[in-house]
Image (cartoon, grey):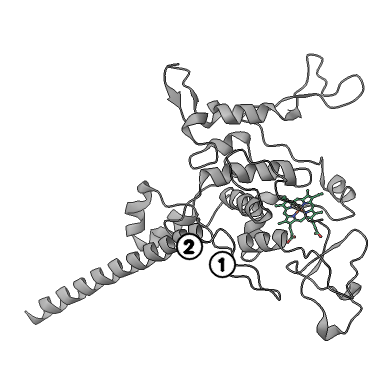
Amino acid sequence: MFRKGGLEMKRVSLFRMVIMAVAAVVFSSGAGAVGEAKHPHPPVIERDGQVIQRGWTFTGVTGDYDKKVLQRGFKVYRESCSACHALEHMAFRSLAQPGGPFDVEECYGQSPADPERKTSDPALNKCVKAIAAEYLVPAGPDEFGSTVDEQGNPLTRPGKPSDPIPGPYQNENQARAANNGKAPPNLSLITEARHDGANYAYSLITGYPETLPQGLKPPAGLYYNPYFPGDVGGGWEGQKKDMPPGGFIGMAPPLVSEGQVAYDDGTEATIEQMTYDVVNFLQWGLPNRKWRPARKQDLPCWAIWPCSRSCSTGATGAFGAM
Ligand code: HEC
């Protein structure tokens, strides 16, 4: 009797613990989402080397991405970052994969089997087809087996959904030469490649000061940013102990004025908003994003603890899904 009771007790308390843990997780991520709506601007700003903790909707088990945010984020990338940064390993059609920016009904294409029916197939997505067609991509050999025209320029054709989104440079040397010796990194991994990447990228882009600290003279072609790792010793005229935090970066502030990207959904394009949107987009596209939203089909998986890690991290993001 006693043993049985004890066992039951254990079972009950284990059950309770599980319920409490689930509630805690759901509550914490839910609270984040509510906070997000209330605070369109960063809730906490910490300087002196600490990054801004922006607050994101994609954190937590129930975290998710807003497709409007992702659409705007792609627009920001395209209009304000893509002149220098590639998104390696991302195909146009990835933009329409489930949960992606253009996985929305108004973009769905016609099913080839039944023209009356719409399909969510990314390769047939109307928005993605239109976007891809606005780019020129390298064409295959022509009927004479050549990949260049009579002037020696590479042959090109309009992009298709299956094409990789072309980057701005042919190779690393060209990228470096065009940017004072500092190659702009591939942005498809950047929020994972840096510690606290989403907050770091947000801080970096919004953090260029309007006026330089007195006594600070960035070397030619470099810009002061309080969040960029390194130190400013080479350009600091004051005492070492007063040296401002951060370092000199080879990127001029990429987002400098309100409305720099023309949003067509009525959202006010402040620098903070544009940055928030583009960082969401970059985070969404990570090949192994940590905060992939939970899906219904994961539920049985989440119930089994050892497997839950693979549920949340094993997903292939847009940049891996060529
Ligand atoms: C005119 C070219 C140019 C544009 C436009 C540009 N960048 Fe950069 N970016 C650079 C260069 C060059 C570097 C490398 C800087 C260095 O290593 O000092 C860089 C570095 C970065 C880094 C990495 C910093 C680090 O920790 O290494 C991030 C993140 C970044 N850019 C984001 C963006 C985003 C987002 C946009 C668009 C909103 C953008 N950049 C637009 C040139 C550019």
Q: Position of residue 148 (x, y in %)?
A: 85, 23
Front in this rendered view, residue 288 or 107: 107
Q: Is residue 24 above or below residue 79?
A: below
Residue name at image x 42 percent, y 52 percent: 294
Q: Residues within 10 Å of mark 1 (few under 14, many from 20)?
A: some
Residue name at image x 46 percent, y 21 percent: 111
Q: Is residue 72 above or below residue 208?
A: above
Horizontally, residue 295 falls left or right of residue 159, namely left
Looking at the rendered structure, the kind of residue marked 1 is Pro
How far apart are labels 2 and 1 at the CA level?
A: 9 Å
Which residue matches tag 1? 43
Q: Is residue 188 above or below residue 248?
A: above
Viewport quadrant of the N terminus: bottom left
Horizontally, residue 36 falls left or right of residue 215, namely left
**Location of residue 74 (image quadrant):** top right
Q: Position of residue 194 (x, y in %)?
A: 66, 63
**Ligand 1 picture quarter:** bottom right
Residue name at image x 68 percent, y 63 percent: 203
Viewport quadrant of the C terminus: top right
Q: Position of residue 84 (x, y in %)?
A: 79, 46
In this view, which residue lies farthest toward the left? 1
Can residue 89 be seen? no
Q: Are marks 2 and 1 in contact (CB under 8 Å)?
A: yes
**Location of residue 133 (image quadrant):** top right
Which residue matches tag 2? 35
Front in this rendered view, residue 226 or 11: 226
